[in-house]
Image: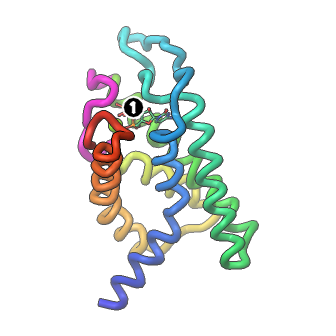
């Protein structure tokens, strides 16, 4: 039991910058869309108006700051800062790719794509962080198990707090 809890703790510590990067645009996003309203070949939005430049940049900065803070707390500033940056860029690119796939599938902005919404950002955060630090397989397994409920829980909380229009 303590082993599992320790593992969950290590997993959360590792992935924290990606979670923060993914949540920040809900608070600080808005303004110009990354696709600037342009349509793809299928005449549907490339990413949609929910993916903004400000949200992306704010997410990368916030996630990197969290990584830097983790580095200060543990005396591994360089490694954690780099991890924060790669996890954050990966998380936001994964989120963007998720929206691209949703639009191609005809799912409008803001509508749910179960699985993709909760795990797309995680897969890319892990891939981008891989050259900096490869977490062991048990941490990765834990992350795939705990991220969907955490994502759904925080989105629901954001909805209840009036930060989001939809509970997912
Ligand atoms: N957001 C943003 N910029 C980003 C990502 C997110 O501004 N790069 C903001 C938008 O206000 C968005 C909110 O965060 O509505 C929630 O993000 P998400 O659920 O990923 O977007 P959706 O609006 O649900 O759009 P999609 O269907 O494309 O996922
Ligand atoms: Mg959404």
Q: Residues within 10 Å of mark 1 (few under 14, many from 20)?
A: many
Q: Position of residue 90 (x, y in %)?
A: 54, 48
Q: Residue furthest right?
A: 78
Which residue position holds label 1? 99
**Considering only vertical position in the picture, is 104 above or below 64?**
above
Q: Position of residue 165 (x, y in %)?
A: 31, 34
Which quarter of the rendered picture does the C terminus lie within?
top left
Queried whether the magenta region covers residue 143, the answer comes back as no
Ligand 1 under 8 Å from disc 1 Cβ: yes
Element type at marker 1? helix
**Considering only vertical position in the picture, is 135 above or below 119?**
below
**Considering only vertical position in the picture, is 61 above or below 56?**
below
**Considering only vertical position in the picture, is 62 above or below 27?**
below
Disc tally is: 1
Q: Name the residue: 52% across, 19% down.
A: 35
Which quarter of the rendered picture does the N terminus lie within?
bottom left
Q: Judge by depth and name the residue closer to the eye, 163 or 145.
A: 163
Left or right: residue 94 versus residue 104 is right
Ligand 2 appears in which quadrant? top left
Q: Judge by depth and name the residue closer to the eye, 61 or 101.
A: 61
Queried whether the magenta region covers residue 108, the answer comes back as yes
Q: Which corner quadrant of the image does residue 39 belong to?
A: top left
Q: Which corner quadrant of the image does residue 106 belong to?
A: top left
Q: Name the residue: 43% across, 14% down.
A: 40
Q: Position of residue 57 (x, y in %)?
A: 62, 38
Q: Which corner quadrant of the image does residue 95 belong to?
A: top left
Q: Residue furthest front?
A: 161
Majority SS type along the magenta span: loop
Q: Name the residue: 55% across, 68% down.
A: 134
Q: Which residues are magenta?
A: 104-117
Q: Position of residue 45 (x, y in %)?
A: 41, 16
Q: Tell me the colour scheme of the image.
A: rainbow
């Amino acid at each position: 039991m303590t082993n599992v809890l320790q593992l969950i703790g290590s997993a959360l510590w590792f992935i924290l910058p990606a979670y923060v990067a993914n949540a920040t645009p809900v608070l600080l996003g808005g303004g110009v869309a990354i696709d600037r309203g342009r349509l793809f070949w299928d005449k549907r939005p490339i990413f949609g108006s929910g993916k903004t430049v400000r949200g992306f940049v704010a997410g990368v900065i916030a996630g990197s700051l969290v990584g830097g803070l983790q580095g200060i707390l543990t005396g591994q500033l360089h490694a954690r800062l780099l991890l924060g940056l790669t996890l954050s860029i990966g998380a936001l690119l994964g989120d963007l790719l998720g929206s691209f796939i949703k639009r191609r599938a005809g799912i409008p902005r803001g509508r749910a794509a179960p699985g993709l919404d909760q795990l797309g950002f995680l897969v890319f955060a892990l891939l981008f962080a891989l050259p900096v630090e490869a977490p062991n397989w048990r941490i990765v397994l834990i992350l795939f198990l705990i991220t969907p409920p955490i994502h759904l829980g925080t989105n629901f909380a954001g909805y209840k707090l009036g930060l989001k229009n939809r509970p997912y």
